[in-house]
Amino acid sequence: MSDIDRRSTSIALGLLAMTGLLPPAAAARAQQRDAAPAFPTRPVHLLVGYTAGGGSDLMARPLAEKLSKRWGQQVVVENRPGANGNLAVEAVARAAPDGHTLLLANMAQLVTNPVVYRNLPVDTLRDLAPVAQIVEAVQVVVISAKVPARTLAEFIALARQAPGQFNMGSSGNGGMSHLALELLKRRAGVDIVHVPYRGSAPALQDLLAGNVQLMIDPYGPFVGRAEAGLVRVLAVTSLERIAALPDVPTMSETPGLEGFEATGFVGVVAPAATPRPVITRLEEAVAWAMRETDLERTYVAQGQTPRFADAADFRDRIARGHETWGRVARAANVTVE
């Protein structure tokens, strides 16, 4: 847009605002967008901190496709696995703050890694700018069918009677599943042994074999096993029941666990110094993709729980996570080198 066009637009918006045809707030937003730097001016790189074909990658690719159509610029998904997602976080934090390098990040990268890893080079609250949340990562509490409990309350009662005799398998130390267990142990007054694995798949195999009795993880991998009666889903970790499991209670419905919540998220972040008008354009584009396309249906088909949150709410969610899970990690002395 030329300088003459910009001035003409500003004058027109001002006249509309004064005559009441355009609310002043709307005029201010329009003027801000008009004054913003052009974006995007070249392909946008959407980094994923995990390998191709994984959960984060499968969410990133349809989002990139929608944003490409919205902007008329290619959005390239770039996999940067390593260090439990931390390598991609650092790459985006150090990228030029112009909106052309973004990260599809999860709870581990933005919250749990920072509160359990020592000496990370990036402060996710300081060095990244939240754009929008796209998915609520609800987990389920699953036990081996070999355990004679039908409810979470019954399982807790069994664990109290046999301290240190029940094991929980997880995908590794310091992750959301591990911290959720530590919070459960504190709230329920039980002694359950944490057994970390190199990923959820081997933990699930030991759950099926009865070597561990409990897992807290996303529902997807358990679907077929639950239907076959090999595992039993006792509760979901969100404050509200979920559409995929309407008959499964929340952990918060169990006496003594009122208000218990252990959910994660997936969202888009940018380098911290990205100009606010660019963040706004990014946020608006993600909102459009979630609300005006079939992206939500795609995520539901993947077993996800789509839930959009704007930049401000997403930032608050990340900050609350640091406070809540940092407190849990410190109390349980959970650290990762």
Image (cartoon, rainbow, N blue to C red):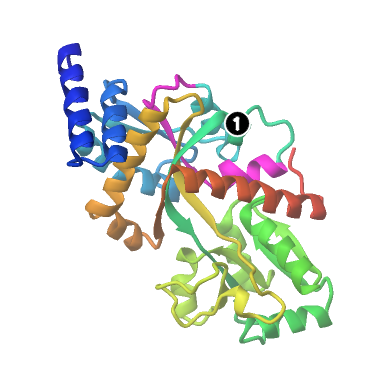
Query: Is 106 included in the stretch rendered in magenta?
Result: yes
From the top left corner, tell me how far across and down residue 149 is, in percent: 65, 86
Given residues 30 and 263, the one toward you in this image is: 30
Q: In the depicted view, which residue is nearer to us: 79 or 264? A: 264
Q: Amino acid at mark 1?
A: Arg
- In the rendering, at what x and y percent does residue 29 appear? 31, 35
The answer to whether any part of residue 104 appears in the image is yes
The answer to whether residue 293 is left or right of residue 119 is left
Q: x%, y% of residue 32? A: 32, 28
Q: Residue at x 62, y 50 (%)?
A: 320
Q: Nearer the viewer, residue 152 or 110?
A: 110
Q: Is residue 279 left or right of residue 201?
A: left
The image shows residue 45, relative to residue 245, as above or below, that is above
Dot 1 corresponds to which residue?
A: 126
Q: Residue at x 50, y 52 (%)?
A: 265
Q: Can you say which quadrant of the picture contains the C terminus? A: top right
- Whether residue 13 sits left or right of residue 132 in the image: it is left
What segment carries the magenta color? 95-116
